[in-house]
């Protein structure tokens, strides 16, 4: 029985940690009724090499347009059931459902980077937005880069942002809080 218990503990250790590591960053533009968010995921070297082995069909170390479309179909679109690991909310904790547009993937040396765009309707009663990428199953570890580009097309509006790291059961998440204030 002790051997079985040790085996279960060992298996839970191996399944309970991330296998993919992603540096995530955001470019945000605040408009009057919506926010445009450009999301970037830069994968670790091992995951990048596996993606290239699977999707770089001509073996040139780059992803051409046809290869990107195939990668999107096979390795990105199925993330819809997980809300693309991207969680955006106003003043509530209920995340908005998102629909990515303009998916792209490219290589830069040893890394594959995904990028996609989101358009989020703004709640007229809110003056903040929470944005994050995380995996509740802890198979993908997202590291949110604190170099965010936040701009606004609104006149007389000041933007600010803060980051908060939260420990949640067996994974952690870094949340980006975007705040805005109208000036008279």
Image (cartoon, helix red, strand yellow):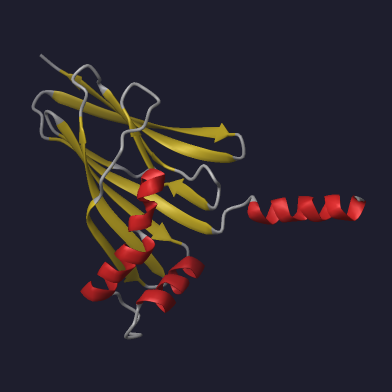
Expressed as whole percent of the image width and height from the top left, the position of residue 4 reads 85, 54
Residue that appears at 25% across and 68% down: 69
Residue found farthest to the top: 184
Q: Is residue 89 above or below residue 21?
A: above
Q: Residue furthest right?
A: 1
Q: Where's residue 175, x and y in %?
A: 42, 35
Q: Is residue 85 visible?
A: no
Quarter location, residue 103: bottom left
x and y percent of residue 159 in the render?
A: 23, 28
Dividing the picture into quarters, in which one does residue 108 lie? bottom left
* Front position in the image: 147 or 164: 164
Q: Give above or below for 86 relative to 116.
A: above
Q: Number of marks in the image? A: 0
Q: In which quarter of the image is the C terminus?
A: top left
Residue 132 seen in the current view: yes
Residue occupying the point 19% across, 25% down: 158
Image quadrant where residue 132 sits: top left
Q: In this view, does 62 lie to the left or right of 9?
A: left
Q: Which residue is drawn at 64% across and 54% down?
A: 15
In this picture, residue 98 sits left or right of residue 182: right
Of residues 89 and 110, which is closer to you in this image? 89
Q: Position of residue 84 (x, y in %)?
A: 37, 48
Q: Is 55 rendered above or below residue 35?
A: below
Q: What residue sits 38% from the left and 73% below the top?
A: 109
């Amino acid at each position: 029985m002790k051997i079985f218990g040790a085996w279960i503990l060992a298996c839970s250790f191996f399944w309970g940690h991330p296998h993919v590591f992603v540096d995530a960053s955001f470019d945000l533009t605040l408009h009057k009724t919506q926010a445009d968010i450009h999301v970037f995921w830069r994968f670790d070297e091992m995951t990048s090499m596996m993606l290239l082995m699977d999707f770089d069909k001509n073996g040139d170390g780059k992803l051409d347009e046809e290869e990107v479309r195939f990668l999107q179909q096979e390795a990105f679109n199925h993330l819809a059931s997980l809300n693309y690991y991207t969680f955006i909310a106003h003043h509530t904790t209920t995340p908005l459902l998102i629909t990515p547009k303009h998916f792209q993937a490219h290589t830069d040396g040893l890394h594959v980077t995904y990028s996609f765009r989101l358009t989020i309707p703004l709640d007229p009663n809110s003056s903040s937005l929470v944005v994050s990428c995380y995996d509740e199953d802890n198979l993908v570890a997202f590291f949110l880069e604190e170099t965010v580009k936040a701009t606004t097309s609104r006149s007389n509006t000041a933007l600010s942002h803060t980051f908060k790291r939260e420990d949640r059961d067996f994974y952690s998440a870094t949340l980006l809080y975007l705040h805005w204030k109208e000036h008279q």
